[in-house]
Amino acid sequence: MLELGTDEYAKYPFMADAGKYLKDKGFTLNQFGTDPDLKSSVEKAFHRLKVSTEGGIYKSALIDGQASKSNVLELEVFSFLLAIVLIKLTGMNTLIKRFALAEARRAEQHLEKDLGKASEKSKIDLAIRIIYDLFGIEVTKQNDFFEIPVADYLKHSISFHEREWKLINRTVENGKVLLTHEKTVRLIRKELGNYINSKIINAPTPPMIPGFEKMVNELINICKKFTPSYTITGEHPPCIKHAIEVLEKGENLPHSGRFMLATFLLAKGQSIEQIAPLFKNAPDFNEKITLYQLNHLAGTSGSGTQYLCPSCEKLKTQNLCFAIPECDNIFNPLQFGKKRK
Amino acid sequence: MQEKEVKFLEEAFKKYYFDHFDLIHIPNRPSEREFGFQKFNSGMTRHISLKDNKELHLLLMQNIPSDVYCSNAYYSFPNLPMNEKDWKEADLIFDIDAKDLHLDCRPSHSITKCNECNQISHSNDHCLLCKSKKIDTKSLPCKNCIEESKKEVFKLSNILIEDFGLEKNNIQVYFSGNEGFHVYVYNSQFQEIGSRERSELVDYIMFKGAIPETFGMKKFKPNRSLFPELEEKGWRGRVSKEIFGSKSKRSKIISELISGGYSNFQKKLENISTKIGAQIDPNVTMDIHRIFRLPGSLNSKSGLTKIFCNDLKRTDPYSESSFLNENTIEVKATCPIEFKLKNKKFGPFYNEVVTVPTYSAVYMICKNLATIS
């Protein structure tokens, strides 16, 4: 792990080993619940968390990426570490996700600034090193752009749903994708989130700290509001309707289409006996083979793996997507007709 | 297929495998690959591990398979069930098949055989005799099919080399033994990427999912200076050449595009996709656990060999991939389409008994258009 300077810890507090950091500074957790001089750190931690639950990004006290005074630096790092302690005390997973995402976006802003500093090579080098150390991506600077090997780009961009991130919509030259500094950082946002997420998950849960109870309860109450409720319509999405129509007409549905249909209906709770007759009009229908394959997909035979319905993105590539406005940018056919209230 | 035909094909295939061991080599890192084979009228046997040419040749002679396959993937334990194999990496593979190119020549050399009454006809959706919809389409590819498929291979290798920076000598092209080509890419940065990432590569190569902004067209306040130049690299350059044609027409066409609007430009990109994108089979490239026909082995859809194409431009698969013997045999053929093998024309045959060389008889029997008389 690379050595960070003082202001870097404030920008990227997740790089610090929490326990070691506090110990090095000579503090115990219990002190934060009782010591009035440390109250501001705890309040800041609570505020930092609360902002993340509202979908915002905590505005740090750093001035232009620099910690102006050593106590500001400490406050920045402490509030991050204490926020993790608060999360662990609530035991709410939804809080972890929201906080990790908000902190990732905050770190993203700093990385973006550092990468964009054309005149400060050391800042750029440090940002590039952080990206390499945490995510194994080799970024090289080429004139005004940052180059990333196509394979590395794909591994990270694959989870983005916006079409501008598709490889076809990027400049690709000689095995590399060319990105601006903003896009380079955006590429690792999710991984930054995941990294912070796993750090929080792996952090030990301390016993309740006297003086933290009120904040912990308040956070639990905030979390309760997050559980969404759905209404479900019985309608099938257009890709599934199309597949059923093709089969009903006795036309050939490609293997990938049959896979989609079967995994969709299995996920909707239909039994193999209910699904099998759908295929009886297929030009090459063989009852034995159909039942074998359905059992295989359901995980009741073979390796026991239960196969999942392919994503809309994959179906588009396979020419099986017939999207209509009602699809409403869903990611998987199983989400069709499932609207948030 | 009846027993008589199976026996005849097995004899011809056995002789080939015996006489042409030199054409069939085990690929590199064999002990990390999964092998599989099929016999005539029988299912697939997979999850086989082989360590050298000797074991491969033994498998061929003992089983006389109709088809032999080998994985593009490398595993720690290739002979265990799929989820225990421990996938390590996979060569990148592309399949270009004439049947997917929707060529105009296709109907002229395609026929259908009814699964219910065996009637052969030119109808493409039902049997003309018994009206059944359970039909098999057979096509005997023509010269145009091969030439058009080659064009797609050239489009593909151009993208692989220019955009992805791949070395020419790491790209190998094979005639599939039926009606297309398999393109193998070795030692690339893509060895370890998974199925979803490969599907993105597919979209890139096929020119699918492009948005107008990438090519300079904005939804609001379009700006002329953002449109691509003809000499640009990658897709911007290719799109520019396709849409503008020449530098002199560029300015006028940009004005037309801007006045046509954003969604018309989107449609234009979709319309040129099949022309400028390489027409590969997406499912093949996306599948990282597939087993592929082994180079040098016979294709049971034709009796032709999957051969390496050293100089694709000059390759004439239907004269170079037929290695079965010349001994003549009498067959009853219903093959209303003329075909050419080893530079010799055969057919059309209309339900008649004919004497033809073994390679030609095998070709028709494999296509289910002839029986041993």
Image (tube, grey):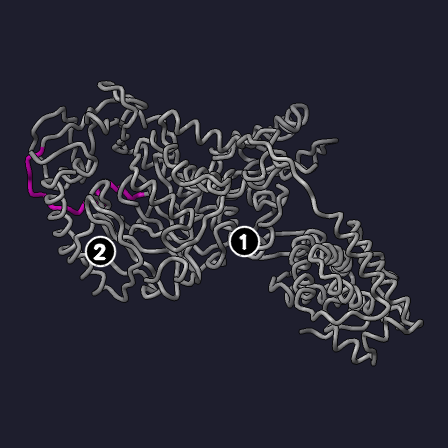
Residue lying at 37% horizontally and 56% vertically, measured from the top left: B72
A220 to A314, vertically: above or below: below
Looking at the rendered structure, whether the residues under marks 1 and 2 are on a common chain is answered as no
Q: Secondary structure at mark 2?
A: helix
Per the rendered image, the range of residues in magenta is B314-331
**Disc 1 marks which residue?**
A174
Between A63 and B133, the residue placed more toward the observer is B133
Query: Can see residue B129?
Result: yes
Crowd around label 1: few <14 · some 14–19 · many ≥20 (10 Å): some
Amino acid type at mark 1: Asn
**Where on the picture, by quarter, is residue B335?**
top left
Residue lying at 71% horizontally and 58% vertically, measured from the top left: A92
Is the N terminus of chain B in the top left, top right, bottom left or bottom right quadrant?
top left
**Where on the picture, by quarter, is residue A163?**
top right
Q: Secondary structure at mark 1?
A: loop
A147 to B139, vertically: above or below: below
The CA span between labels 1 and 2 is 35 Å
Q: Which mark is residue B23?
A: 2
